[in-house]
Amino acid sequence: MDRHLWIIRGGDRLEGEVRVPGAKNAVLPALAAALLTPERCVLRQVPDITDVRIMVEILETLGARVEVAGDVHGLALAVEARDLPHHRVPPDKMERVRSSSFLLGPLLARVGRATLFSPGGCDLGPRPIDLHVKGLRAMGARIDTEDGGVQAQVDRLHGAQIHLDYPSVGATENLMLAGVLAEGTTVIINAAREPEIVDLGILLDRMGAHVRGAGTSTIRIEGVARLAGTEHTVIPDRIVTGTLVLAAVMTRGDLRLRGVIPDHVRSLLMNLGGEGVHIEAGEDWIRVRARGRLAPVRLRTLPYPGFPTDLQAPLVAALTLADGSSRVRETIFTRRFAHVEPLIRMGASIEVKGDELFVAGVRALRGTTVEARDLRAGAALVLAGLAAEGETVIRGGEQIDRGYAALDRLLQSLGAKVSVKARESA
């Protein structure tokens, strides 16, 4: 398999205007939702990323027909799941994308059977799907979780009141996907409140579902007998938005982002201060102008509307050049520090104490060879490379492709010296 090498010559300011693509974390559950109806569903503003391509392959394996076309703002995907003759998700595909676990609810709701294996994605520590399983069992599903997989079946799901021990995004979405075709009323208490939950609720309602409360801690779903096809444009990616905001700050650039929802990144914008760092926002745009160093922060990652764990690594990269010392606590995942050692190799001053990072701002980072071990760590290393002195080589750049569509070309259009090459794996 080819592995990608990112080569970055740092020191250039990012300047210009760019439109942010659709959200990875919104389109993946939307693709799962398309299995709930035999009719055609069209998703627009879809990012052309690896995780989306793998999810499309999985849907086709299950029997759905997927048409992929270019769109002015990304991809347009047309999914028609007229028949679903297969209910088993192949383990070789399942292990490549964690969001394949979203298929459990739709398959049970539509065909009454599902066989899944341990989902993949980034290695961020234990990420069990026990909340998914507990909720689906409450809805009548018979589920066997032995041997590292999940085998589930049901005659028909029924509504239930489900209290989540933790506001898990994945569990909330899976139970929403299951509940829309269940018999009766499903109530999810302590539900996740992320914007992607709201987007999924809007899509399901357009398909004929009755979902109320998406975006609040209590979601109420009145089951229906059948859903219809529809068209839906996914929301802009708030993590890509935040990453580009931080890229502008780190390179002391002048960047305008279009097609965004500023409120979705409010927790980031509120923490970006410092002399010479100016941020303006309108209804669907953000402008970042940076001439000085970022002010230090003290924060912790939290479920939405708190600071997102997916922006922790990119923010830490920016804080390595801040004017002072910062303290960042990671409360969501136990192993989300894959960016620390590579950043230290580049000259950063970071100390890890349990679930906290202590980051002392340095004068400059220096280019060297580092490895991206997960998606967001890879993004952090790209940011560091843009600001570093000299050349940075990032191995394992295919991790970045999982969540950022053609990020190298986007950065090139803003003035960065970036190239991506493929090399044969040893």
Image (cartoon, rainbow, N blue to C red):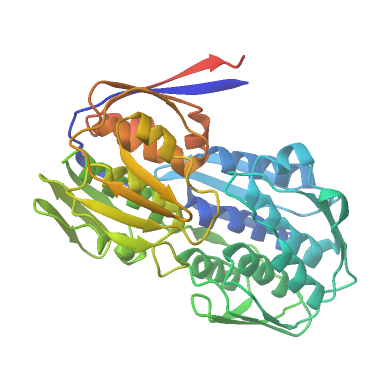
Q: Total number of numbered labels?
A: 0
Residue found 66% across the figure and 39% down from its top = 96
How far from the left and from the top, in percent, is residue 79? 65, 50
Residue found 27% across the figure and 26% down from its top = 366
Query: Can residue 230 be seen here?
Result: yes
Q: Quadrant of residue 264?
A: bottom left
Looking at the image, which is closer to me, 109 or 4? 4
Residue found 21% across the figure and 47% down from its top = 322
Looking at the image, which is closer to me, 292 or 73? 292
Q: Is residue 13 left or right of residue 32?
A: left
Looking at the image, which is closer to me, 105 or 384? 384
Q: Is residue 389 left or right of residue 140?
A: left
How far from the left and from the top, in percent, is residue 352? 42, 48
How far from the left and from the top, in percent, is residue 139? 79, 77
Q: Is residue 372 left or right of residue 172?
A: left
Above or below, 121 against 220 in this view is above
Q: Quadrant of residue 364?
A: top left
Above or below, 313 against 153 in this view is above
Query: Can residue 237 be seen here?
Result: no
The C terminus, quarter of image: top right
The N terminus, quarter of image: top right
Above or below, 132 against 77 in this view is below
Q: Quadrant of residue 219?
A: bottom right
